Amino acid sequence: MLSALITIIRRDLLVAFRRRSELVNPILFYVIVITLFPLGVSPDHEFLSKLAPGVVWVAALLAALISMESIFRQDFDDGSVEQLFLSQHPPTLLILGKVIAHWLITGLPMLVIVPLMALLLYIPEQAIPTLFLTVLIGTPILSLIGAIGVALTAGLRGGGVLLGLLVLPLYIPVLIFASAAVSTAIEGLPSSGHLAMLGSGLILALILAPLAISASLKISMN
Amino acid sequence: MWAWFHKLSSPKYYYEWAGKWLPWLAGITVILMVVGLYWGLVVAPTDYQQGESYRIIYIHVPSAWMSMFVYVVMAVAGFVALVWKTKISEIVVSECAVIGAMFTALALITGMLWGKPTWGTYWTWDARLTSELILLFLYFGVIALYSSIEDKRVAAKAASMLAVVGVVNIPIIHFSVTWWNSLHQPNMDIISENPSMDPSMLWPLLVMATAFKIYFVWLLFIRIRNEIISRERTTNWVRKLIAES
């Protein structure tokens, strides 16, 4: 079973590396959205660092959303998703593998770039570890929930806008707890409570989301 | 009991069964609404703090209750639709989404109208208002998903799935928003021995709440019957029905 999981992760990573431009696009989008805020609102030091936790996370939500399509779209069109269900291994496990691979492709680069974004938005240094942790715990939740939305809209042409409508409201708790954790860290207060909530959210999503994704894919394959 | 449920899940039987209920539901709704509105808007005393403006609660509170109740009904029907794949429960999901969105919008609009004289602003980012707004978005999501898939049976299954996912998320969203910010008054304590609301104001509210609930059932039955006719329009019994009328 574990080898099946590893095989599917390796396969998805390989496919992603063969199309490198798609690897870079979401992260570029992320950086550009963050750059828009100082330009659109105010470059003021104080003001930006107050706004920063929200900006970093709203941008992360949007970047996660636009990168989400790639998780099943191609596989759904060429029939690989059907093969997942025909395999001898439980489909939820294989789907979990696909989500992990997708997170490695989209979430991990965000993790690398987020300290740099923190500098751009004047987030004080003491809050950067917390910001890093929220991205580490939060982005997998985004991938798991987003995959449900993609699975539901997989059979549709141009499901992009619809996906946002379905998934963004479900992202709200992540946004609230993650940006609250960063805000408290900026004020120098302990943020472990918010991080713990985020962590429990991740556990819940890890358990329930693969079931929902596999049921949704089955509906879409109908 | 189970045999009856099975019978009810057949569109033709359901259509006839629900048709018999319609006049009763309509009658009860109208009577309760007239009584409740007269009692609430005319008979009930004026509030010593909020003056006459509090009377909007006779619309606002029942529709806010309904907005959540309908979501639960939708999610339960969605679960039934996914597990037992009955046609009627699939129709209930899509029809509940529309009705629920309507109640949620009504709760938001009346809440804003009440907020202006009481809080001095139409909108504040308080926890209850915000989670009600998010609930409206969740309803819109279900409606949008249902209407963008062409095959109505697949659409209903997808919408059911989304409703079930949403109902797991609603408590999480609600609590996260509550911790985030709160200004709305806490839930009223109406059932215990010392209710925070005077009986002279409370009774009309309960009448209105019941009226809304029965109104919902009435509306749901009408919409389900419509949807049955439109989906089964190629079958013999619908043709016969149309020929007779």
Image (cartoon, helix red, strand yellow):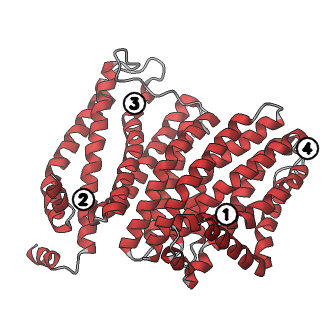
Q: Secondary structure at mark 2?
A: helix
Q: Chain of mark 2?
A: B
Q: Secondary structure at mark 3?
A: helix
Q: Which mark is residue B222?
A: 2
Q: Which mark is residue A100?
A: 1
Instruction: Tell me, yes or no, whether dots 4 and 2 are on the same chain.
Output: no
Residue at 16% x, 62% y: name it: B7
Q: Chain of mark 1?
A: A
A216 to the left or right of B17: right
Marks 2 and 1, how far apart in space?
46 Å
Q: Secondary structure at mark 1?
A: helix
**What's under tag 4, amino acid-wise?**
His
Which residue is the site of mark 3? B55
- Crowdedness of circle 4 by 10 Å Cα count: few (<14), some, many (20+)? few
Q: Secondary structure at mark 4?
A: helix
Please tell me in which quadrant of the rendered image residue A166 appears: bottom right
> Dots 3 and 1: beta carbons under 8 Å?
no
**What's under tag 2, amino acid-wise?**
Ile
